[in-house]
Amino acid sequence: MKKICSIVRSFFHHELSGFIILGLLLRIVLMPYFVGPYDISEYQSGLAYFLSGYDPYALHASIYPPLTHFLTFPLLRLAYQFGMSFGFHSVSEILSGTNFTGLIPMMEISPLFLIVWKTPLVCFDLATGILIYYFVKELTSDTRISKLCFIVWFFNPLTLAISSLLGSYDAATGFFILLGAFFLFKSSYFSAGFSFGLGSLTKISPIFVAFPLAAVLLFKRDSVIANASRFKSNARDLLRFASGCAVPLASFAPLVIEYAGLMSSGISKEISIIGGLNQWFFATDTLRSEWVNSNIAAIQTAFLYYPAIALVTAILFSRFFKLDQKSILFSTALFTDLIYFFLPITVQPQYLLWVLPLLVVLLSIAKRYVWSIIICSVAGLLFFLFVQGPQVFLYPLAMFTSLYPPRVLAASVNNYLNLPGFFSPNLRQDLWTIFGGVGFLGLLLTTVLLLKSLWVKDNEK
């Protein structure tokens, strides 16, 4: 008991305690009555099958990697023991006018389900913020900058929206990528690989970061060590890194294999969703969506060459840049940033949480990264809100409280959908184009800044 009291006292005396409490309160407000509805039925069905002992991939009930189920399973099982129902309930007839758009789910979403579902995400938000704090402290030895970087992450509106409003596990993916970068910074290669392997069980993207990083580790230069000894040392580092990646993937091997098969068979559908690649930063319009959907086979074929492209990029990268503890951080951020240009699946704003924690850490090294953070966060948030319209996120609030009547919600959504645009038939298409274009430019800016940082680091040597 004394130990617990000591821990509690230490927490309240820590300089982050007030910010943590305020950030958690904000998330508690958002968790139960706000949601991005277009994916929630997938979450519910996959978890319902999983909790019932069925294979969610064999039944095509889930489109998410296996670790997401295991992270949420204990909480949902506990809630189930206390009488929480996982059944689906038909939505009120008053909302049927908006069902045809796909913006309002056909099933009611319990606020209790949303709290349970989002609780692990809030934990990852906090864990990422704490890791940022200690990572920056390691880099700068300045607690003031560390605290500022924590605030930039924990109170970023995009971070709040994605984890506490939408309920997306990209918060977990971003944490594992950042954790992998931290261990690379500490030259703990097995732990770094293990982090990327775990991250790949929440979203597939970390493995696409790990692959070029493995090549960088093999070909990295060090002017102090002779060539033969350097290659042996690099090979040992690579083996540790690859072994770390393999352990979590092997532990979930049956589900990983099923999930990979599901993704490969369903990638055409994912690409063709309202224009696929241009759903986000290229923005959807009739001409471009037709072009993408008519060239799905070519896009898939090009993606098959990603390993070769990444390998060549990593070798060239190693040829022109020497790596030290800081530059390995820049290189991790660079390869994470490049994912957005290589992946052939539908790109969505929540994916920005893969790279955002890294950019917050880099802010402590170079202030210019504040522009990348601001541009990507604002563009991603506004695109996220205006794809479906801000009103649609109030769906649970309308269903389970008297604060926002369902009839008013239905009318608001339909009015938004029918607003005429300036350049396109609908205003929302104009907003997609504007905020999508700004966000895409933000990613290009990030790429340029990262290359510039690596070039400066190399010239310093």
Image (tube, rainbow, N blue to C red):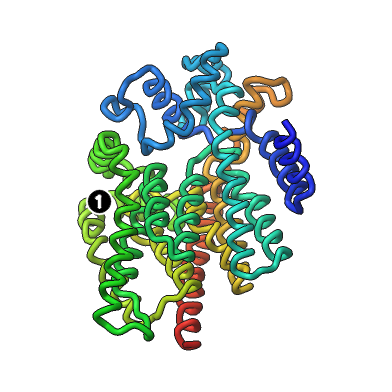
In the image, residue 194 above or below residue 37: below
* 141 lies left or right of 117: right
Residue beneath disc 1: 296
* 416 lies left or right of 56: right
Which residue is painted at 58% across and 47% down in the image? 127
Count of numbered circles on the image: 1
Location of residue 330 in the rendering, given as x and y in whole percent from the top left corner: 47, 70
Give amino acid for label 1: Ile
In the image, residue 32 above or below residue 428: above
Q: Locate the N terminus and report the quarter of the image it occupies.
A: top right
Which residue is painted at 38% across and 44% down in the image? 274
Res 227 quadrant in image: bottom left
Location of residue 31 in the rendering, given as x and y in whole percent from the top left corner: 63, 33
Location of residue 37 in the rendering, given as x and y in whole percent from the top left corner: 52, 32
Q: Is residue 41 visible?
A: yes
Residue with the most extreme front position: 2
Which of the pair 127/190 is nearer the observer?
190
Which residue is painted at 70% across and 44% down in the image? 23
